[in-house]
Amino acid sequence: MNLALNDSLTGEYNSNSQIARVLTEEWVEKNMYCPRCGNLHINHFENNRPVADYYCPSCNNEYELKSKNGNLGHKVNDGAYNTMIERISSNDNPDFFFMNYSKNELKVIDFILIPKHFFVPDIIEKRKPLALTAKRAGWTGCNILLDKIPEQGKIDIVSNGEIIDINYVINKVNKSSLLETKNINNRGWLMDVLNCVNKIPSEIFTLDEVYNFENILHIKHPQNNNIRPKIRQQLQFLRDKGFIDFLGKGKYIKRI
């Protein structure tokens, strides 16, 4: 993997967005492997495909690329809000690559994968509709809120200019796949409880410490009046998948 961006293909473009697209898409096509199966190359779909940018010719998994010059920050712009929510709800969503690159250095700084099963409506922020005077008046876009995604769903491939070992990446992707659930409501609950566990600073934690998030979870899930049983259900799921261990007497230890 070569972290340098090739600017030899950008001479015919004047738009900064077009130049950025050519730089970053060419890098992924030339350098990126499939983090799902380890195939050494992924292919680019035809341009302007509405769902994904790349696919693996070996396992057929699909990927979409979002890139930014400078730090990714807490949110990344995406397309139409309603389309994104529909994709998430129907499980017809690609995995996402997020790239942070330096235009001045022509170098990839960070490159992370967020698997599709970490996407829930709560991480999709609805933007204000375009003004009536705009060319696409009323069109409503969205942002992906990276800070609402559990750490287990942010898998580094390049971190601060350092390339992460491919086997380490694939193992992390495979482990994260244990959290996959098709039901969008169950997925939302799982991500919320996992975020609560992550916020507890100590490795060993108690059930009561997770119950401290009860009010927050009730606000997120106002139709559910059985928050504590739901918390225990998600903790059992995390235990069964090997992300936490139950120590007895209301105590758990993180394995994440």
Image: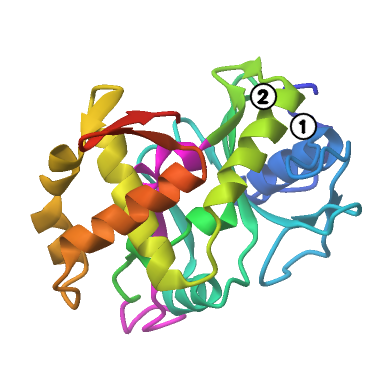
Residue 65 placement (x, y as % from top left)? 64, 50
Q: Is residue 179 visible?
A: yes
Q: Nearer the viewer, residue 137 or 2?
A: 2
Per the image, label 2 sits on a secondary structure element best described as loop
- Amino acid type, callout 1: Asp
Q: Nearer the viewer, residue 8 or 233?
A: 233
Q: Residue at x 91, y 52 (%)?
A: 58
Q: Which residue is mark 1?
A: 7
| Mark 1 or mark 2, earlier in chain | 1
Residue 127 in the image, given as x and y percentages of width and height: 32, 67
Q: Is residue 231 above or below residue 1?
A: below
Q: Are marks 1 and 2 in contact (CB under 8 Å)?
A: yes
Residue for point 40% across, 34% down: 245
The magenta stretch spans residue 145: yes
- The amino acid at mark 2 is Leu
| Residue tagged 2 | 106
The image quadrant of residue 113 is: top right
Q: Which residues are magenta?
A: 131-154
Q: Furthest-top residue in view? A: 162
Identify the image quadrant of residue 168.
top right
Is residue 28 depicted above or below 124 in this figure? above
Residue 43: % across, % down: 86, 51
Using a 10 Å C-alpha cutoff, classify the residue at mark 2 as few (fewer than 14 neighbours), some (14 to 19) or many (20 or more). some
User: Which residue is painted at 46% across and 81% down in the image?
Assistant: 136
